Image: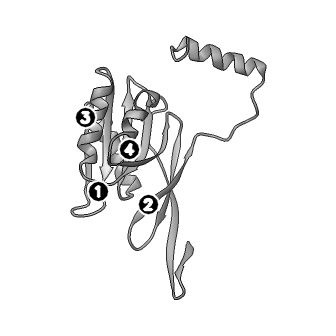
């Protein structure tokens, strides 16, 4: 529990927790924040427009009105996974997108261009912990832990391996 001073006479209690994103190791997730119920439809349309092969599921935590987890996608399993994780995170105006047959690098610019998107916390296939702050008002994402701590600094062989990998998978010529 943490107390944050808001003015001379008031403190707000903030409870800090983490939520581990439940996903298969090879599945990519994008976690972000948006601001309007239209987010679900606009993200869906954007993702469909990026690639005809992209499979995705998305969920959005509505922060006012009925406060529902809104969801959409073109892969039922990914929609279910996004919805389950959005319920676990439970932070107002947060969204999760799970991707198959495509990578975040292929969709991030398009996702950022959706007018309702305020920001992206991460886009990764790594294990992810979402850092949550909870007050009387509700829950918010404070940040994410994306993967593990580095084990060292790359050397010349590591640099060559990185360059070769990018060319082998088609991201560099």
- Helix, strand or loop at disc 1? loop
Q: Which of pointers 3 and 4 indicates the residue nearer the eye?
A: 3
Q: How far across and down, in percent of the image, does residue 130 sit?
A: 50, 51
Instruction: Assess whether mark 1 and mark 3 are in contact (beta carbons under 8 angstroms).
Output: no
What is the distance, in whole Å, between disc 3 and disc 1 at their CAs? Answer: 19 Å
In the picture, the disc for residue 45 is 3
Identify whether 2 is placed above or below 55. Answer: below
Instruction: Assess whether mark 4 and mark 2 are in contact (beta carbons under 8 angstroms).
Output: no
Q: Which of pointers 3 and 1 indicates the residue nearer the eye?
A: 3
> For mark 4, does the 10 Å Cα neighbourhood hold few (<14), some (14 to 19), or many (20 or more) residues?
many
Name the N-terminal-most of marks 3 and 4. Answer: 3
Q: Which residue is mark 4?
A: 96
Q: Along the horizontal axis of the image, is 167 left or right of 41? A: right
Q: Which of pointers 2 and 3 indicates the residue nearer the eye?
A: 3
Q: Which residue is mark 2?
A: 140
What is the distance, in whole Å, between disc 2 and disc 4 at their CAs? Answer: 14 Å
Q: Which residue is mark 1?
A: 62
Q: Image point 39% across, 53% down: which residue?
A: 88
Name the N-terminal-most of marks 2 and 4. Answer: 4
């Amino acid at each position: 529990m943490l107390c944050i001073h808001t003015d001379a006479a008031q403190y707000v209690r903030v409870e800090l927790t983490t939520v581990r994103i439940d996903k298969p190791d090879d599945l990519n997730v994008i976690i972000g924040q948006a601001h309007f119920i239209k987010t679900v439809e606009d993200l869906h349309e954007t993702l469909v427009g990026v690639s005809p092969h992209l499979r995705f599921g998305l969920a959005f935590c509505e922060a006012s009105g009925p406060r529902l987890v809104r969801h959409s996608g073109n892969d039922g399993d990914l929609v279910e996974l996004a919805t389950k994780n959005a319920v676990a995170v439970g932070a107002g105006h947060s969204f999760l997108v799970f991707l198959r047959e495509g990578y975040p690098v292929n969709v991030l610019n398009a996702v950022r261009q959706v007018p309702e998107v305020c920001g992206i916390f991460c886009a990764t296939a790594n294990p992810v912990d979402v850092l949550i702050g909870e007050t009387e008002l509700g829950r918010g994402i404070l940040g994410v832990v994306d993967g593990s701590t580095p084990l060292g600094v790359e050397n010349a062989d590591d640099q060559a391996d990185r360059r070769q990998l990018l060319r082998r998978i088609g991201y560099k010529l």
